[in-house]
Amino acid sequence: MSKGPVVAIDGPAGAGKSTVARAVAERLGCLYLDSGAMYRAVALAALRSGTGLDEPAGLEALAARADVTLRPGQGSVSRVLLGGEDVTEAVRTPEVEEAVPRVAGVPGVRAVLIAAQRRLAEAGGVVMDGRDIGRVVLPHADCKVYLTADLGVRVRRRYLQLRQQGRPADLEEVGRDLARRDSWDHAQMARAPDAVEIDTTDLDVEQTVARILALCPGGARRAGN
């Protein structure tokens, strides 16, 4: 028996997916699963091993043997494991971030990680965010949401996030990076047809969370918590 709903949250970079997904998971008493962190872990493994980012066969083989998974951490947040090593912080470096789109674009890598993500969600009680969760990874999710926002707003959010993390950031470069990622997402992924779109351009985190909770089984009564 499921211990809670399965919630899929998709959307482009800077739409607020991770922040909102963590808050939704906490309100629902579910585990937050950051699907992107799993791709980051494979990218980290590739950088460590010297596997070429332009070698699809090598990246697929690496993903198959890398033993990437997520486990419960403090509260609703999950920790990222690579071969049993906690790499939650290590996967957030600029080098890994730059490598991730090339790794995630390999169909074989995606197949390996999608299978792993589905296993993690089998028992229910999870909130997973990414860019193809509702359509491909969890097509039978109890609640599917697609978050979006104007590009200018997403650029500012990403810029402020980087500054808060103490990382160097240039507003124009952040804008170019998000535009490139949008182009790649548009070519590689698609929104689930039954996902509810929420434009977060003029919404804060709490307002966005409340709208998602209203869509989730048992979530409406937790919207004000």
Image (spheres, rainbow, N blue to C red):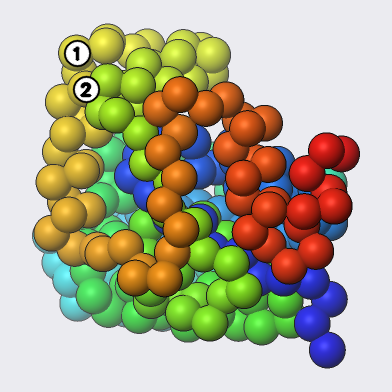
In this rendering, position of residue 16 left or right of residue 143: left
Q: Relative to 140, is 194 above or below?
A: above
Q: Categorize mark 1 by other alpha carbons within 10 Å: few (<14), some (14-19), many (20+).
A: few
Q: Where is residue 20 drawn, in percent x and y?
A: 60, 40
Quarter of the picture containing the C terminus is top right
In the displayed image of the protein, which residue is found farthest to the bottom? 1
Q: Which of the two residues, 162 or 146, is positioned nearer the viewer here?
A: 146
Q: Where is residue 48 drawn, in percent x and y?
A: 38, 51
Identify the disc placed on residue 219. Answer: none
Which image quadrant is residue 210 in? top right
Quarter of the picture containing the N terminus is bottom right
Q: Which of the two residues, 7 or 195, is positioned nearer the viewer here?
A: 195
Q: Is residue 158 visible?
A: no
In this rendering, position of residue 125 left or right of residue 36: right
In this rendering, position of residue 153 left or right of residue 209: left
Reading the image, the residue beneath label 1 is 172
Q: Is residue 9 visible?
A: yes
Amino acid type, mark 2: Gly
Amino acid type, mark 1: Glu
* Number of numbered discs visible in the structure rendering: 2
Q: Categorize mark 2 by other alpha carbons within 10 Å: few (<14), some (14-19), many (20+).
A: some
Q: Where is residue 180 drawn, in percent x and y?
A: 15, 38
Residue at the image position 51 percent from the left and 64 percent from the top: 144
Reading the image, the residue beneath label 2 is 175
Residue at the image position 19 percent from the left and 13 percent from the top: 172
Q: Are marks 2 and 1 in contact (CB under 8 Å)?
A: yes
Residue at the image position 13 percent from the left and 59 percent from the top: 187
Residue at the image position 74 percent from the left and 81 percent from the top: 123
Q: Where is residue 104 drawn, in percent x and y?
A: 29, 60
